[in-house]
Amino acid sequence: MLALAAGTARAQTPLTKGKGLLTGTIGYQRVSSGVTRDLFEFAPTIGTFVADNLALGVSASIRLYSGNANSFGSNSYAVGPFARYYRFVGGDKFALFGQGSLGYTRTNETGSNGYNQGYLSVTPGLAFFPIPRFGLEASLRGLTYATNFNSTSTLDLGFSLNNFQLGAAYYFGK
């Protein structure tokens, strides 16, 4: 009887060991207040479930900034590993998740040599699974620590609606 109950509980978990995860966000922001600034961001993530509800993988991002003040522009590229854990609530349609990331960022700015940073972040989120293999995600930027490895470090608590992101996820495999 216990084995049957355990098997049934496992069958209700849609994110099982061996599945793959492909997710990401695309964003655009324009700020105009005398000076116009544009930001475009693309951040794909790919991983595999190493245990039920636990995914490990690699995330990347590309951010392109431009502004009309002094022809300002910058771009940054980031890459690093992540771990994400899902906790289902109220059945198999909704899950809370937490994602921890560690990585490297390279930023180039107009008129400068650019700089490198390392980062560590923790991101909370909510996933909705309307149909098998597809999810919609909402997250906040959360907590981020970044350092340029010699003189500057930043601790950022991004728990505000200004840092709200929507994304989509595809779960493939088994």
Image: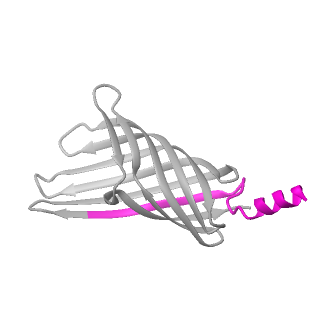
Above or below: residue 65 compared with residue 138? above
- Which residue reaches farthest left? 34
Q: In which quadrant of the rendered view does residue 113 lie?
A: top left
Percent position of residue 107, x then y: 31, 43
Give the mark count: 0
> Is residue 167 inside the magenta stretch?
no
**Residue visible at 70% across and 53% down in the picture:** 52
Q: How is the image coloured?
A: one colour
Q: Can residue 26 be found in the magenta stretch?
A: yes
Find the residue positioned furthest to the bottom. Answer: 131
The answer to whether 126 appears left or right of 87 in the picture is left
- Image spot of residue 124 (x, y percent): 48, 53
Q: Nearer the viewer, residue 174 or 2?
A: 2
* Residue 53 percent coordinates (x, y): 65, 54
The spot of residue 173 in percent (x, y) is 70, 61
Would residue 140 appear left or right of 11 to someone viewing this image? left
Left or right of 1: which side holds 159? left
Say which quadrant the C terminus sits in: bottom right
Quadrant in which the N terminus is drawn = bottom right
Residue furthest to the right in view is: 1
Task: Determine which quarter of the picture holds residue 165.
Answer: bottom left
Residue at the spot x=72%, y=54% of the render?
18
Seen at 83% across and 60% down, the residue is 5
Residue under the image location 30 percent in, 36 percent down: 115
- Magenta span of residues: 1-29
Q: In this orientation, which residue lies closer to the viewer: 71 or 129?
A: 129
